[in-house]
Image (cartoon, coloured by chain):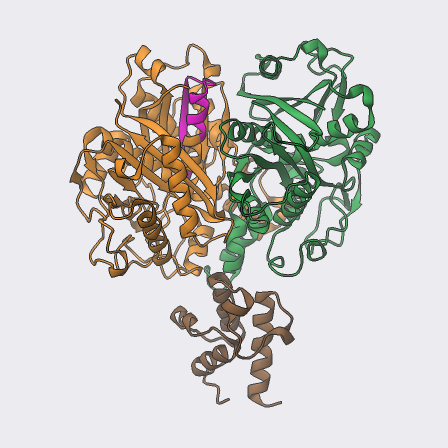
Chain colours: A orange, B green, C brown
Amino acid sequence: MHRVVVTGLGPVSGIGIGVNEFTAGLRSGRSAAAPITSFDASGFPHHWAGEVPAFRPEALLRRLRVADWGRSALFAAAAARLAAMDAGLSLPATDPARVGAVVGTTSGESTVVEQLTAELVAGGYPTMSAEALRQAPAERLSYAVSAELGLAGESVTLTTACSASNYAIGYAYDLLCWGEADVMVAGGADSVCRWAHAGFYRLGALTEHACRPFDRDRSGILTGEGGAALVLETLEHARDRGARIYAEVLGYGVNCDAHHMVAPNEESVAACMRLAQENAGVKPEDIDYISTHGTGTPANDLCEARAIRAVFGDRVPPVSSIKSMLGHTMGAASGFGAIATTLGIRHGFLPPTINWATPDPQLSWIDPVPNTARPATVRVAQNNGLAFGGNNAITIFGAIR
Amino acid sequence: MTGLVTGWGVLSAAGESVSELLAAVRAGAVVGVDVRDRFDEPLPTAQAPAIADFDVRRLLGRKGTSFLDRATALAMVACGRALADGGLTPDDDNRHRIGVVLGTTTGSLKSTMDFSRETLVQDKPYLVNPVLFPNTVMNCASGQAAIRYGLRGVNATVAGGPLAFLYALRYALNALRRGYVDALLVGGVEEYTPNTAWAAELTGAGPAGEAAAVYLLRRPTPGLTEAPRAQVLSVATGFQPEPSVDGLAGCVRRALATAKVRPADVWAIASGDLDADSLSEVVPVAAQRWSVRPALGDCQSVTGALALGVLLGRYAEDPDARGRPALIVGRSRDGAVAAAVVRG
Amino acid sequence: MSDRDQHMAELREIVAEVLELEPEEVADTADFVEEYEADSLRAIEILARIEKKYKVEIPQAELNEMRSLKAVHEVVARHAGWQD
């Protein structure tokens, strides 16, 4: 069994593109929330989201032709390019078949599908664009990463909704552990789209301007977007090439609520935390920080906080939700959580939960690291991902020993 | 890393068994079902290789089924049949050790586009039906199958279009090898809708097909008494977009090496489309070549699962085939390749 | 048929369709969640169909009250100005 480490980070987010900007964004509690520009949101009572208006794929990508790919694939590939550069990977690799990509997503090429829908509404099915139809399959997110970086190893997209990045990191971790690859680029990507905005609004789960997880008056999510990528490699491979090591991937756990497509399940979320901790060989008292799923809906945060208490008892570590800054970036969310966790371990700080004003008496055991990043020694940290379909996935990272 | 196939649930235009599937693929002619009355919208063809007479209420009951999309319902039925065929009954002792891994292309394109269309055509863009919102996520089928059968173990959806089943199989083998679960329902599903029919027509991939094929894969453990129908020995994948590189042959070699199977011993290859001499640089020309697509159309993420069904049909009908290794292979338009080695 | 009976019949039909029941199975005072496994998605859709049919706007906060057919009728009557 190989040990697995994080050597490169590639965030393409509304609070910063590239690891330096993103770190500064986390430390200063920057917010990506702004009026929506990627579609006409004028008919919606709530029309803010966490978009990435500064995203210029052509400025980041070296090999892909931007016109050939949908927005989510471009997010994934750009994030991967940034992560590879941050890791100092020399590409193409000596043995490209030993380097692969795993990308998680909720809605895949949602903006491409919405383009097809607009064509269908305007002129009927036969007027749908063949090029858009070719860009629509979700598998193209990981193919974009592999094509951009010239990787010949496994290239797979996991569509397990809003915990998908953690699924991706976990699967990549297993392949590396087992010696099936030397390096894996893992993460997730999604794009802000009209249908998700409408769906969450209709569920009463969309807030107006500010996502405030764990606050008594929290009122929902902001939809968000972006690409998150981590370069994972075996410890030997990283040491052999003299790579900087951010943190170690200690393990992960996945399970399924098998209860409800939308509502989270406290018992099952707690069970997933225990699976992850057991897989990582850590105990609750070892964990110094939890990057929560923390969507900012009343139901999610209550359920997640209760599950945390069930697992951690009286020793609940500080927790925060970076969705307060980024919005809910869907399939990329737990990827950004993993990046934030990794940075917290490396640089010794806890990312804040911004927009937090009022304690929730129902969550008395939660310290949400309110509004301001906090210096802290983080030896082991847990990164929660929950999802529609009851697809829970939790990753655990540790300082390199 | 291996897994034992102990049960199957297969629904296709050819029928609801692997023997009917094999017969249709052997005949080779497209299995045409009249689809003219299925939708209000026009379709590119009057006939298509779609599943006939699928009555979700009869199969799954009234409760909880009227808002399911067809892909989800098909997957749920196929999962139930695979569990029953494999003699595995989920209960409170084992349900956290049983999971689902399904392949997909875009989830239900119809569910997503219908939901998206409502935001354009309603008086207000948010007047969407919230009950249909879960159908827009690509893990809907695996999540609903888990709910229906109470399966709390690893639950994943793997996108890969024509390679999705092979990716799902590899994902599943990893979860079994790592000991995360003892049993997984592994398969793929694609529904026939105006959306898929026109997508296949307009991209020259037509005709669109419709199928759901799910297999119960068990971890080889000493206590396991069910006789396996086949063993999955290995899956290899890769990404080789350059046409000059024969990525699939290399991928097949790797899969065979991992499975410790000599190329000369391969008895059959199954895929979406194969010629008589496909992969002849690796596998003997004498090995049988089976193509599911001429009979069943473009079944995307079910293609590999149907190919496995054909092989299971052959193992069942031909005693001489038993114990001989076979391949399931695939290549995507973008240059991804995958190969699985099985033995019946 | 009185206005009230007419409205109750229409509401019963909406509720039955969303909860996947036959109209005659929906009792006037049965709790949607306890008796018919309703969830928040279905509750919102019931509300939405009522809003569409009667061209009224009902705040989502009223959902907490709308737990049975009788309660639904009371809420809708209040917002639609029915004199049932």
Tell me the residue at 67%/32% (across/down). Answer: B225
Q: Where is residue A334 in the image (x, y as percent from the top left)?
A: 37, 39
Observer-nearest of B43 and A142: A142
With A118 as the anchor, is A238 left or right in this view?
left
Q: Where is residue A381 in the image (x, y as percent from the top left)?
A: 28, 35
Observer-nearest of A224 and A64: A224
Quadrant into which the C terminus of chain B falls: top right
Query: Residue pushed farthest right?
Result: B27
Q: Where is residue A371 in the image (x, y as percent from the top left)?
A: 19, 48
For the question of whether residue B205 can be seen, the reply is no
For the question of whether residue B303 can be seen, the reply is yes
Q: In which quarter of the image is residue B100?
A: top right
Q: Quadrant of residue A81?
A: top left
Residue B302 magenta: no
Quadrant into which the N terminus of chain B falls: top right
On screen, residue B66 above or below A190: below
Observer-nearest of A338 and B323: B323
With A129 as the anchor, is A375 left or right in this view?
left
Query: Residue pushed farthest left?
Result: A375
Tell me the residue at 59%/33% (across/down). Answer: B161
With A34 as the anchor, is B177 left or right in this view?
right
Q: Position of residue A255 (x, y in %)?
A: 47, 41
On screen, residue A293 above or below B159: below
> Number of marks in the image?
0
Residue stretch in magenta: A171-192
Tell me the residue at 54%/74% (across/down). Answer: C53
Observer-nearest of B123 and B54: B54
Query: Residue pushed farthest front?
Result: B223
On screen, residue B5 above or below A225: above
On screen, residue A260 above or below B216: below
